[in-house]
Amino acid sequence: MRSPVEELWIRRFRDGDGCETKLVCFPHAGGWSSAYRTWPLGLPSDIGVLAVRYPGREERLNDPFPSQLEALADDIADALDELTKHQLVLFGHSMGASLAHEVALRFQGRGRPPAALCVSGRRPPHALDGRRKLADTDEGIIADVVRYDASRAAVFADPDLRELLLPALRADYRLVNAYSGGPRPPLDCPVYGFTGDDDSEVSPDQMRGWADTTHDAFRLRVLPGGHFYLRAEEAALLADLSDVLSHVKSRTTTPS
């Protein structure tokens, strides 16, 4: 039986009885779980596709924001604890990559590491020094978002939508700026990196630093595009993730 806490934190796009392997997706800063709503169409039918619902958005508009990214990782790891009975693959983009990594470490600390960690568009924790600090004013945040997605300009021009979206963006930007990272214990699962070849936030060489976060294998896939390459390249990304998931299933025949 699914717990109410788990249901609060997780949105299930596909999670039938045959989905013993589950892909758990972590959105970027300011992102919503709905960013992953189309992913079941591009992944094998026996893969569960779930996304984390952060506080302060979607059905959780009135839930308080955490003060630190590490505290958010604690909350997510606690809420998803029962899911670790299954074979989990964690995928996170940008801020979500740091968060997925922190959650993977917490699962491992409990003796139940994920089957794999997939990180996208984000420097590894030990290489965060010198990164660009995100904007800390509303106008700066809006300009930052529109810089990556010009279509969002119309959304922020609507006062009601602006006030709906800004609290989560402010909170997430504070989390990212406050997260200093640093050395972390190596994971006991493979790590797969993904990035755009024209991402201004992280270079392919910096993404290769994720190899230092695991005792297991590491592999990087570079796709065309900038920081949000995964929108235009969704089909290619999901095809690669399908291969990752197939490899994970072949390595482990029973739930972790």
Image: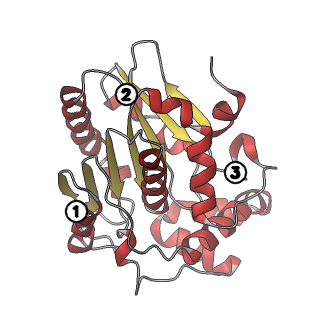
Pointer 2 residue: 41
Q: Which quadrant holds residue 210?
A: bottom left
Query: In the rendered structure, which disc, 2 or 1, sits on the residue that comes first in sequence?
Result: 2
Q: Quadrant of the N terminus?
A: top right
Query: Whole-Å distance between the Cαs marked 1 and 3?
Result: 31 Å
Disc 2 versus disc 1: nearer the observer: 1
Judging depth in this view, the residue of 239 and 253 nearest the camera is 253
Residue type highlighted by circle 1: Ala
Query: In the rendered structure, which disc, 2 or 3, sits on the residue that comes first in sequence?
Result: 2
In the rendered image, the residue lying farthest to the bottom is 130
Which secondary structure lies at badge 1?
helix
Q: Which quadrant holds residue 208?
A: bottom left
Q: Position of residue 242 (x, y in %)?
A: 25, 34
Which secondary structure lies at badge 3?
loop
Which secondary structure lies at badge 2?
helix
Pointer 1 residue: 211
Q: Position of residue 215 (x, y in %)?
A: 22, 55
Is the C-beta separation of discs 2 and 3 under 8 Å? no
